[in-house]
Image (tube, rainbow, N blue to C red):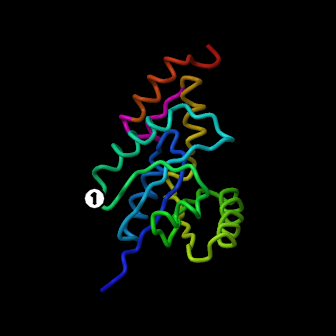
Amino acid sequence: MSVERTGVYPGTFDPITLGHMDIIRRGAKLVDRLIIGVTTNPSKSPMFSLDERLAMVRRECASISDDIEVVAFDALLMDFADSVGAGVIIRGLRAVADFEYEYQMAGMNQQINDRVETVFLMADVSLQPIASRLVKEIALYGGPIDKFVSPKVCAEVTERVEKIGRKGS
């Protein structure tokens, strides 16, 4: 009898990008069950509410695998991982700056809970420049974001920008 391998892919996903989706697709192949933990980050100003982001991520992931679960969490990542029985944290890396931050976080997380491993997946070369923060910034200035997010997410971001108003106009 084999033990189910559960992984967690945490993030704010504000909005979920094609880069996130690449990591989700690839991460889902590494574990039996992937839990996408959507969280709030006190240092970020979200464009979408937690409920909106949960719905967005669920919709975008619906066709990938039945073994993906999307849940909200508001706790230390290692406590969340323990609560869902995860042995692996999946993180995407785009550049050296990501690595430095993620390496430090992985070290801290290991000090908190050494039963959970962090696995880094390099972003696909074509997706490396994509960051939710930049997608929002481009959209707020009226630039095209269709190369960075799915058509549905593009429409949602565009609609939100129309509500809150563009910058520089």
For image coordinates 45% across by 69% down, the residue present is: 85
Instruction: Determine which residue is flagged by label 1.
Output: 66
Give how far across and how far down residue 151 sits, in percent. 36, 35
Examine the structure image and report whether residue 136 is included in the region drawn in magenta.
no
For image coordinates 58% across by 18% down, the residue present is: 166
118 sits to left or right of 6 = right
46 sits to left or right of 51 = right
Give how far across and how far down residue 15 sits, in percent. 49, 39
Give how far across and how far down residue 150 sits, in percent. 39, 40
Name the image quarter holding the C terminus: top right
Q: Which quadrant of the figure has residue 57? A: top left
State the extent of the magenta-drawn residues as a range: 143-152
User: What type is the residue that disc 1 sits on?
Assistant: Asp
For image coordinates 38% across by 59% down, the residue present is: 25
Residue that sits furthest to the top in the current view: 169
Dominant SS in magenta: loop
Judge by depth and name the residue closer to the eye, 69 or 131. 69
Q: Which quadrant of the figure has residue 146? A: top left
Name the image quarter holding the N terminus: bottom left
